Amino acid sequence: MELYFAVPLVLVALLVAASGIAAIASGWVLPMRWNRHQIRRVRLHGYGQLTVAFALCWQVVVSSTALSDSGWADDVSLASVLTGIILMAVS
């Protein structure tokens, strides 16, 4: 994976992970007009954000190592992203 693509992806993953940790620890969610009122279970939303952040970091690690040739590594990343999105949608 190219460095100009990996660095912003890791930074976005860190921001999503920080938001997820804040949601789990203190119940704080980013104040957006359309987002905040629809979230009923804040901790579940935080776990979904952490799952998405893990998937983004996993994709960077897989793409930059020898695991990029194996098909299961991409499947883990896809399953993690979908799981995180489902957790955030259910919350």
Image (spheres, rainbow, N blue to C red):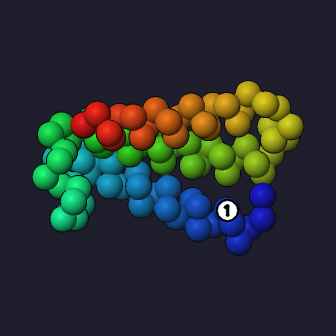
* Residue 18, position as x, y percentages in the image: 36, 55
Residue 12 on image: x %, y %: 49, 62
Question: Is the residue 1 above or below the residue 40 in the image?
Answer: below
Q: Is residue 48 above or below residue 12?
A: above
Q: Quadrant of residue 79?
A: top right
Q: Residue furthest front?
A: 34
- Asked whether, in this view, residue 19 is left or right of residue 5, the answer is left
Instruction: Give the quarter of the image for residue 72.
Output: top right
User: Where 39 falls versus 15 (above or below)?
Assistant: above
Question: Please, what is the three-letter code of the amino acid marked with disc 1?
Answer: Ala
Point out the residue furthest to the top here: 72
Q: Nearer the viewer, residue 25 or 35?
A: 35
Asked whether residue 25 appears in the rendered view, the answer is no
Number of residue marks: 1
Q: From the viewer's perspective, is residue 34 above or below residue 69?
A: below
Q: Quadrant of the C terminus?
A: top left
At numbered mark 1, what does the secondary structure look like: helix, strand or loop?
Answer: helix
Q: Residue at x 62, y 43 (%)?
A: 58
Residue, disc 1? 6
